[in-house]
Image (cartoon, helix red, strand yellow):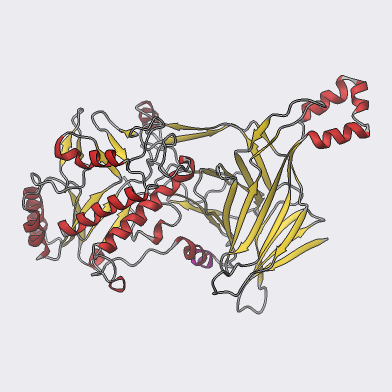
Amino acid sequence: QTVAHELGRFQIMWDKADLQLKVTHKKRWCLTDCTSTAWATVPGLPFLIAANGPIRVHQLMAGHFRVDITRKLQTTVQTVDAVEFVPPKGKPGKPGFEPGSVVLRGVLVKEDARPDRLLSAFGDVRAAWSERTAQRQMFKVEAVLKASYTLTFSPASEARLAFAFAWEDSVPGVQRSPGGRRRAVGLNHVVLRYATEPGERVYGMGEQYSSLEHNGKRLAIITQEQGIGRGKQPVTFTFNRLGGAGGSWHTTYSAIPHYLTSKARSVFLTNFSYAEFDFTDDDSISILSTTPANTLTGQIIGARSVPEVVEAYTEYSGRMQPLPEWTYTGGVILGMTGGSSKVRKVMGLMKDAGVPVAGLWLQDWGGTRNTSIGIERVWWNWELDQANYPDWAQLREEVRVDGTRMLTYVNPFLMDARGSKGRLYREAKEHGYMVKTTAGGVYRLGSEPGVSYGLLDLTNPSAARWIEDIITAMAVDTGAAGWMADFGEYLPFDCELFSGELPIAVHNRYPEDWAALNRRAMLRAGLGSIAEGGDGEGVFWSRSASSQTPRHTPLMWLGG
């Protein structure tokens, strides 16, 4: 009644009697109670669902988004027709090695809606009788919407099992009558549903400011501005009226598709498309994904304790490197703006008060401007402003006498302006380095009157290298020990990318690409660790994050 296959320390078992798929994990160096259930489906219910319906992304004020998905139809029946074991090829650690895998094959079916069946049965007795004929039964079998699928499991490590759910994303729709037309139906989002236990508490999902335990909640995976108000009234209502900046309880710079439970169970996705994790049911968890590549990928963690889950997950996500000693032993890191004179004045006050300053974060190193509504904004042009800091090098050496390092600021935007302040914008526009509109022009963003800027297209290797060179030069020329790598969550969903990828597949990846770029710039500037050939002094911090951002950034900014 069961089919079971071993993959490393995991076992994948299909129970034909209970109609349940189960993944167990066997612990190493264990004598008793060595096997635990890492993941299991709800017995008798479909665990894979494909659906069709419009996906609308409402782009509010720049950096704020709302996604609405209207499900017009969805599959209601799932078959498991085969469970295949694919043996490994080659030897572990050798070139060309492929780990073994287990592949489930089947069909996802959409039945007629219940009202249609009732009308057919009671509306016309003759028609109802004809429904029982063999010819009619055969037609009904062939006329339903059917989509083939595969669910593939393969070991990613001793404690992580990778899965890939692939399906036919365009299939003939339901045929209502013999000879009738069947329009093509695009299956543009899917649901993975599986079991949880009563009392099993859910944590994780990135930087969640308003929720620690997520049971009874549904969380969207979309990196964006965290919002002003975040559901608290009347603040949220007010800012939503002023362009949609109110946000919600779950809006965050760092939405990560990973959770762990109090039972030491954990699942995470490895693709970047918009997703929703639904923890509202007592006996099941559902993950909705809008991946446009008709493949949903992720991993299941096998562990016996929460620390083991964290260890296994951070093997994938990366672990933040230790911070330079000066960042936590040398005093405060002071953020300020105002130019050389003000910096000297404030530093004098700090010294007189006996407050040690480890770092001076000067966000306005490139200058400031007043917008048309009187708000002061930092210039996003990534060149030292000689008017604000005419003696930058001298100032740097003065504060270094007391052990204070200089820190700067950068983000992936370029401001449009006349004169020298707009030089980099014009250069990036000439070379096509910024995200474009569907008409081919620069996709201009702006979060307030009088401010307009473009976003660098990091899917363009030339653009990524160009801004990396600029950041490296910033670090070298200013002698800064680090900087804030701000933003990363603004990629619009209706833009054109150099790579040809759909923005919905890239939006949540952008923060990770941005962090990796800054990491490379830090190493090139000689600010990496001693082991990496650097001076061990460098640090940068990120505002937004994707799953593997910790592999690149050593520090996160929580926002304000």
Image coordinates of residue 83 in percent, x first then y, are: 75, 58
Please indicate whether residue 358 sits to the left or right of residue 53 in the image. left
Q: Viewer-proximal residue, 332 or 61?
A: 61
Q: Does the magenta stretch include residue 537?
A: no
Residue segment shown in magenta: 307-311
Q: Main secondary structure of the magenta part?
A: helix
Q: Viewer-proximal residue, 259 or 426?
A: 426
Please indicate whether residue 503 sits to the left or right of residue 362 in the image. right
Q: Residue at x 33, y 55 (%)?
A: 517
Give the answer, above or below, for where 433 lies relative to 176. below
Which quadrant would residue 550 be assigned to in this image?
bottom left
Image quarter hosting the N terminus:
bottom right
Which quadrant would residue 86 be assigned to in this image?
bottom right
Q: Residue at x 23, y 38 (%)?
A: 426
Image coordinates of residue 467 in percent, x first then y, are: 28, 50
Q: Is residue 309 magenta?
A: yes
